[in-house]
Amino acid sequence: MRNYNLNHLEQLEAEAIFVLRETAAQFENPGLPFFWRKRLYYNGLFGS
Amino acid sequence: MAYLAAKAFAPAKIPFPFVHVDTGHNFPETISFRDKFVEEYGVNLVVGLVQDSIDRGTATEETGPNASRNALQSVTLLETIDRENFDACLGGGRRDEEKARAKERFFSHRDSFGQWDPKNQRPELWNLFNGGKGQGENFRVFPLSNWTEMDVWQYAKIEGIELPSLYFAHEREVLERNGSLLAITDFVSANENEEVRKRLSGFARSETLPAQVR
């Protein structure tokens, strides 16, 4: 029989997709900004 | 997030535009990654230029050797939201990132000034999300709220999601300044007393660094 249980990543994916669809459904004009973070500083480096 | 948006509406196209707040100070890799994705998925792209905000006088450019346009991004973002009349902005914020994000709802209400007021936040029972709002108000929406950073990396691996090459370490020309290594780019160059060397290094994103380094 097919297994319908979702693992934790599948659950998170389903939740995120539900929220994305809900956004498209409830709002007239949604948008997705690329870089949200107020402080996305690309100036520190991690060494190796 | 972009990948999930594509997956959520497939085989239709993503029904909302992507917004890029362009500082004019970008890594070329970022722009080519953006354009490739937009082309592949037929996304409608809206660009807000930080330069326009500076020209309009709503943002003031920092000066000095460590000048950055990162702080100006939020001004331009708000102006772009205004111009395009967005009533909801999607974000990739996760509750594991820091305390200001930990308290967020999936649908986070903002008043007409873009302010977050705890009394205006909606209860989110089971999977009921309330997007009711007044004129001029808008929402921030965080579909990845319950993910952890590890989930993101594992998911990207399982789904074979292509990641920007900037996320990974490469041999780069770097210089040391104030105890941190900076990569030589179009916007960072060495002073005469600084030594430039080649080294395997990668860019750290601010949320992965301890607060005192940010």
Image (cartoon, grey):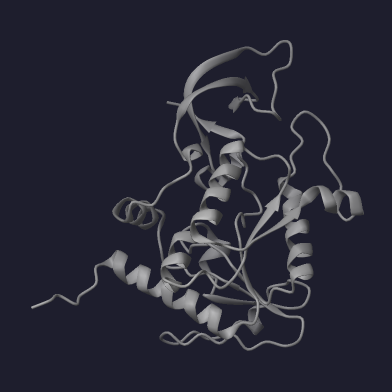
In the rendered image, the vertical position of residue B38 relative to residue B132, given as above or below? above
In the rendered image, the vertical position of residue A45 relative to residue B131, given as above or below? above
x and y percentages locating residue B161 in the rendered image: 38, 52
Q: Is residue B161 left or right of residue B166?
A: left
Q: Residue placed at 46% from the left, 27% from the top?
A: B170
| Quadrant (top left, top right, bottom left, bottom right) of the C terminus of chain B | top right
x and y percentages locating residue A45 in the rendered image: 54, 31
Question: Can residue B144 be seen at all in this image of the molecule?
Answer: no
Q: Residue placed at 53% from the left, 86% from the top?
A: B123
x and y percentages locating residue B15 in the rendered image: 55, 73
Which residue, as the protein is rendered here, is positioned at the far left? A1
Q: Residue placed at 63% from the left, 89% from the top?
A: B132
x and y percentages locating residue B204 in the rendered image: 52, 38
Question: Can residue B145 be seen at all in this image of the molecule?
Answer: yes
Q: Quadrant of residue B130?
A: bottom right
In the rendered image, the vertical position of residue B172 relative to residue B149, given as above or below? above
Q: Is residue B22 left or right of residue A43?
A: right
Give the number of marks. Answer: 0
In the rendered image, the vertical position of residue B106 relative to residue B183, given as above or below? below
